[in-house]
Image (cartoon, rainbow, N blue to C red):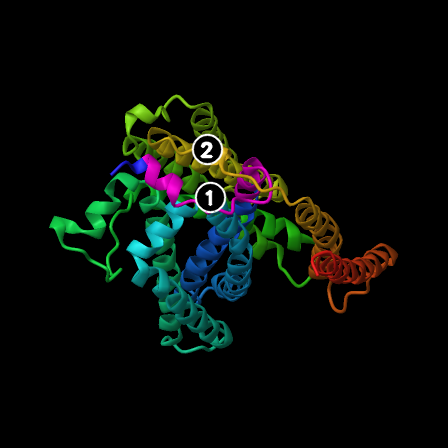
Amino acid sequence: MDIGSTLQVLRDPAGIPSHPLVFQVLMVFTWIFHILFVNIALGAATMALLGFRRRVDPHWQRLSIAMTKVAKVSVSLLVVLGVAPLLFTQVIYDPQWYTSNVLSAGWAIAFIFTLIIGYSSWFVFYFRNKEGAGSGVFWFGALGLGMFLLDGFIMHALSYQALLPDQWMEWYAPNGEVDMSGSAIHAWQTARGLFFLAMSATVFGAFLLAYGDYFAVREDRPADYLAFARRLGGRIGGIGAGTAFVLLILWLAGVPGELGMWTHPITLLLAIYLAVIAFGLWRHRQGNPGGGYLMMMLATGMAALVAIFREALRVAYMRPFGYDALDYKVMADYPSTALFFLTLLGVGGLVGGFYLLTLYRAGRTDGVYQADATVARLGSSAVGILVVWVAVFFLTGLWVWLGNV
């Protein structure tokens, strides 16, 4: 069987509505925000459980309760923000992604149920993690975190299996016996999986620094508690980034040398960046205020470099099989493409901007938040753009329908 020809045949014969580069860029861009909330969710959940165990110290108890809420919200956002990169992956890497999911179909389906179990368990922990909570509450949180980690492993395995089309037939019919159960995880890369856990520590450390600076204006957040959170953030983030640097090397050691990833510019840039951010985060381990937002921006930059590195790695893995996402068949559909980008910029920019600005300012306000004129105007604009979007959506559909009757 010629693997390259098979991959070409498995592509959607209808093609895609715009140039593949558009989907490739969007896939990388949207994955950045998804992985940031994955990192924050895992870090916050771990810290919430650790704080619960040490809740005799009031600082740990306060941090545990706060991070329980952070993890709850972050899981919601990582799920919502994970839809876009998944869809863009399915558009230009459909042979790889669907084949991997079919080969491990049982695990792909189990992902949904384990996520439901994990989130439900975390909600129990969220509702009961208060002053005077019994020790048994811990196990609901532990189950939730365990399910989140399992889901992360499933996604890691499905993504890695998609990079190995030369092994698909062996997994599908081991020793000539067809296995259609979908019950096996066929491949994973330990260093790659652990890298993302170290990345979670790095991003969460930066998040704790920003958390300390964000609430510095609130009188109900004691300065010694915020300094405590910053000290933890500096230590956790610094150790996480240093560990991620080592794991990146081990990850590359498991990548075939002929793919040329050791000398790829993005690899060198990512390695240097990890060393720099490790130093920057470690410098904040004393808990002094300031610099938290900068470190969070640097952590976002790290996520962007990792996103580009992942795509460069995928391109390198596919190159020997003659598969290039950029030569995907295009059946141009300009109206839908224009509607997508106008929605992204208009609805996403105005409505998303309104929500973000409102949440940011409300969180830094003691008591009831009163929106100023800027936020009020932005809110009115957000409502207006939604009305326009709904009108354009239905008018476009009507126009297409009338043009084909």
Mark 2: secondary structure: helix
The percent position of residue 81, horizontal first and vertical second, equals: 55, 55
Q: Are marks 2 and 1 in contact (CB under 8 Å)?
A: yes
Q: Is residue 384 above or below residue 285?
A: below
The picture quadrant where one finds residue 295 is top right
Residue 181 as seen in the image, left or right of residue 339: left
The percent position of residue 154, horizontal first and vertical second, equals: 34, 55
- The residue labelled by disc 1 is 202
Residue extent of the magenta highlight: 4-28
The percent position of residue 5, horizontal first and vertical second, equals: 34, 37
The percent position of residue 53, horizontal first and vertical second, equals: 39, 65
Q: Is residue 40 among what the camera can see?
A: yes
**Nearer to me, 136 or 323:** 323
**Nearer to me, 234 or 205:** 205
Q: Is residue 197 among what the camera can see?
A: no
**Nearer to me, 2 or 253:** 2
* Crowd tier of the residue under label 1, counting other residues whose Cα lies within 10 Å: few below 14, some 14–19, many 20 or above: many
* Crowd tier of the residue under label 2, counting other residues whose Cα lies within 10 Å: few below 14, some 14–19, many 20 or above: many
The picture quadrant where one finds residue 397 is bottom right
Residue extending furthest toward the top: 263
Compute the Cα span from label 2 to label 1: 9 Å
Tell me the amino acid under the disc marked 1.
Thr
Residue extending furthest toward the front: 405
- The residue labelled by disc 2 is 274
